[in-house]
Amino acid sequence: MADNGLSDNVVVIGLGRFGGAVADSLQKLGHEVLGIDNDPKIVQEWSDRLTHVAEADATDEDALRQLGVPDFGHVVVGIGIHIEQSVLTVLALAEVGVREIWAKAVSAKHGKILSSVGAKHVIYPESAMGDRVAHLITSRMIDFIEFDDDFAIAKTRVPHAAVGRTLAEVGLRRRYGVTVVGVKEPGREFVFARPETVIPSGAVMIISGPTEKVQRFAATT
């Protein structure tokens, strides 16, 4: 493990639906993951899925030190329902010197408390997913991600009128105020957009821009 918490190794505390999904994805990406939970049944379930799993009380600073948690670069606190345990865990992590703390919050008030006791990044997975699904249901977008500053990235179908033409000819930025990041044709590699990129039939586009303009463009596809 790297010194001073600068490694890409990650501790995930709370191996429920959210924490477990994060741990699994991190390991698939090649990161070393230490999973921690205080439920022996959950620890047993994950013992053959993660390289390192431990049963421990994550609110106990001594237990965190014994597990070498301060040596990891990032810690994700996936505890959500038990708010007191979530807050005390973040506090204990801050006390042992962990700087990159990512914590799940179930409400805005919960998030404010987590930030005040040491969480550097607060995540609202239910809220974010709910907003994302709402946009997909009420639009023709295939996928959608919105950022805090009214900026969005979306996957959309190609407008029929654009098929066979170059991005320069179509002029989506000029007409709709959106930027084409790239084009993906079925069975082929993703192509980053250039003015001379020809838009093939059956492809999808990744576009970005102000949320309202992205939604307006998606309605034309």
Image (cartoon, rainbow, N blue to C red):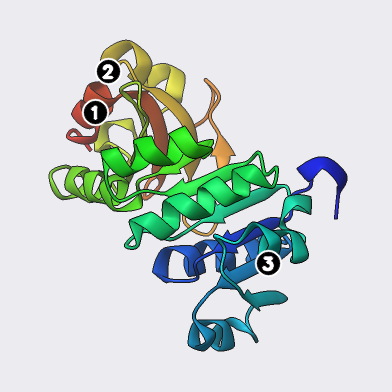
Q: Which residue is mark 3?
A: 34
**Element carrying mark 3:** strand
Total marks shown come to: 3
**Going from the N terminus, do you reach mark 1 or mark 2 first?**
2
Could you give the CA–CA distance between mark 3 and mark 1, rounded to whole angstroms?
A: 43 Å
The CA distance from mark 1 to mark 2 is: 6 Å
Measured in 3D between alpha carbons, the distance from the residue under mark 2 to the one under mark 3, in whole angstroms, is 46 Å
Which amino acid lies under the numbered mark 2 shown in the image of this protein? Answer: Tyr
The residue tagged 2 is 176
Secondary element type, mark 2: helix
Lower sequence index among marks 3 and 1? 3
Q: Is residue 55 visible?
A: yes
The residue carrying pointer 1 sits among few (fewer than 14), some (14 to 19) or many (20 or more) residues within 10 Å by Cα, namely many
Q: Nearer the viewer, mark 2 or mark 3?
A: 3
Q: Is residue 116 above or below residue 150?
A: below
Three-letter residue code for mark 3? Leu
The picture quadrant where one finds residue 151 is top left
Q: Quadrant of residue 11?
A: bottom right
Q: Is residue 88 left or right of residue 53?
A: left
Quarter of the figure with the C terminus: top left
C-beta proximity under 8 Å, tags 1 and 2: yes
Q: Nearer the viewer, mark 3 or mark 1?
A: 3
